[in-house]
Each structure stands twice: as structure tokens, then as C-alpha cells.
Image (cartoon, rainbow, N blue to C red):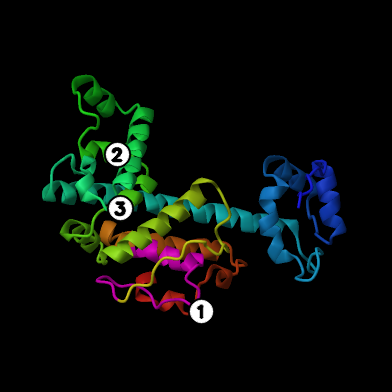
Amino acid sequence: MTLPRYNQPQISVADQIRLLRSEGLIFSDENKAQHILENISLFRLKSYLIPFRTSDSRNFKPKANFDDAYKLYKFDSELRKMICSEMEKIEISIRTQLSLIMGEESDIYWFEDPSKFRDIHRHTLLLSKLETELRRSDDDAIVDFQRRYSNTFPPSWMTFEVSSFGTLSMMYRWLKAGLARRKVARFYGLTDTIMESWLHSIVYVRNICAHHSRLWNRRLSINALIPRRTHLPFVDIPADTKRVYYIMSIILYFLQAVNPQNTFASRVRALLAKYPNVDVSAMGFPSNWQNEPLWQ
């Protein structure tokens, strides 16, 4: 069957406001709303309007206000920025631990050795990604190394500084099972299987944040594994592990090893206090989440 071609015309911001008002949305300040919609597309804001619509039609619930939807958008933006700032600490730590532990177990160019990896084709893909990331880098140390030496790659501690979090995650995932792989995981109080899964999941969430996509009530398409036990405090497993609460708990778990004095939990509480109308149950937060030792 041939699919029809989409060809609906674009409508002006003024018409967008008229359409939303006809569906029951209240505008307290139409000039402010126009300015917002001129700088943040209605397509991007649509996801934040959904909680204010009735379930059986396109109409809005009584008293649904554009300002409330915009506040939800701002909450999500602040949440993503907060998560990104903490993810940076985890990413830098993992770069360091991979380089230190694998370098001690092998040598400074261990990542070039296909015998360290499960699959030679994936290893070739990994090296190709690393080469691409090196070519893009204008880091002074990288440029100086390439000027002075004939090696394809600088040593691991230098190469990993310009590699993406996604590449690091793939590198760990494709490592052969063994003592070194387990040592990296053990630094964070995890088994290597859980480490692999959790790394993959937080990279996925980091990409959502980096592309400014909606996060707060999203049901994630990647499900982080449930650990049988952890060496550091974790949470009681929530009913839905594809919601953002579970992945935020995983981030907080990593921070116990990376930055024990972190303020992530208190910053989350402060953000929720700033936006009291946010439905935390839509994020997967259980009713007793603040009593969890990890979140105290």
C-alpha cells in the first residue's frame, strides 16, 4: 500500500494560539505566549501540553493554562541540565578507570589489541570511531602528540579524553569477560553485567539530555538491569524501571563512588520544591522515595 504524502501547511504563531484557545487552553498573557512560541516551537511544547488535555479528546481540561505547560517545560529543561552536570563526573571517572585498570593489566595501547575484545568486527568499528573522534579534536596535547610520534593513537589516557561517552560504553560492553573487566565494575560496587547495562542506559539518557528532548515523564526504551545486590546503597526497585526515577537512582548510585560529597539528591529535592505542581509519579517516583537511604 502506498502511504499518503503529508502536506499540511504551516500555521502562524497567532493561528497556533487561536487553535489552542479553541481547544480550551487559557492564555493569561498572550504577548508572552507569542514570544515563547516564536522561540520554542509548538511541536517541541506539544509533549508538555498533553498532561493538560482530556484523555478522550483534543480538548483541554478545565482551567488548563499555557503558563502551567511552560513551567513544566522549564522544569524538564532544568532537570536535564542537572543530570548532564552529574553525568559529566561519571563519564570522566569511567574514562580514568578504564585507562588505569586496563593499562595495569595490559599496556597503554591495550584498546588496539583485538584479542582483548569479544568480536573482531566490533573491535574494528570501535577503532574507527576512535579515529574519527581523534580527527575532530583540536586538543593541544593530541595535536602535539601527532606531530611528534608516528602512532595511530595516543596512549589510552589521552585517547579517551576525546572519545565520547557512547564510545566508552561500547568499549566496555565489547571487552572480553575477565578480571580486568570485573575490576572496573568493582570500583563502582557492581558486577560487570550490571555495569555494562547501567552504562548503556545512562549514555542513552545523556543523549536525550544533549538533544534537549523531553525527559521528565518519558518511558525509556532501554531498560537498565535490576541488580541482585550492590556493594553500595541502592533503592528498592520501583514498579516501573523504565521511568526516570530509576535512572536517576542509578546516576546517584555511581556518584557514591565518584563524588561521595555530591549534592545531587538535595538538588533534586530543591528542583521539585521549585515546581510543586510536577507529578512525580509520572516520573516513576514511589511515594516513599525520600525515605530511601540513597536519596537522604
Residue 70 rendering spot, x and y as whole percentages: 67, 54
The residue at which mark 1 appears reads as 287
Q: Residue at x 81, y 48 (%)?
A: 16
Q: Residue at x 51, y 79 (%)?
A: 287
Crowd around label 2: few <14 · some 14–19 · many ≥20 (10 Å): some
Q: Quadrant of residue 161?
A: top left
Magenta range is: 229-253
Q: Along the polypeptide, which appears first: circle 2 or circle 1?
A: 2
**Element under disc 2:** helix
Measured Cα–Cα span from mark 2 to mark 1: 40 Å
Residue 285 rendering spot, x and y as whole percentages: 50, 72
On screen, residue 128 versus residue 55, left or right, reads left
Q: Residue at the far front: name it.
A: 1
Total tally of numbered discs in the picture:
3
On screen, residue 47 versus residue 151, left or right, reads right
Which dot, 3 or 2, sits closer to the camera?
3
The residue nearer to you, when weighing 165 against 270, is 165
**Element under disc 1:** loop
Which dot, 2 or 1, sits closer to the camera?
2
Measured Cα–Cα span from mark 3 to mark 2: 19 Å
The residue at which mark 3 appears reads as 174
The label number, if any, that marks residue 35 in the structure image? none
Are discs 3 and 2 less than 8 Å apart at CB?
no
Q: Main secondary structure of the magenta part?
A: loop
**Element under disc 3:** helix
- Amino acid under disc 2: Glu
Q: Along the polypeptide, which appears first: circle 3 or circle 1?
A: 3
The residue at which mark 2 appears reads as 161
- Amino acid under disc 1: Ser
Measured Cα–Cα span from mark 3 to mark 1: 38 Å
Above or below, 8 relative to 245? above
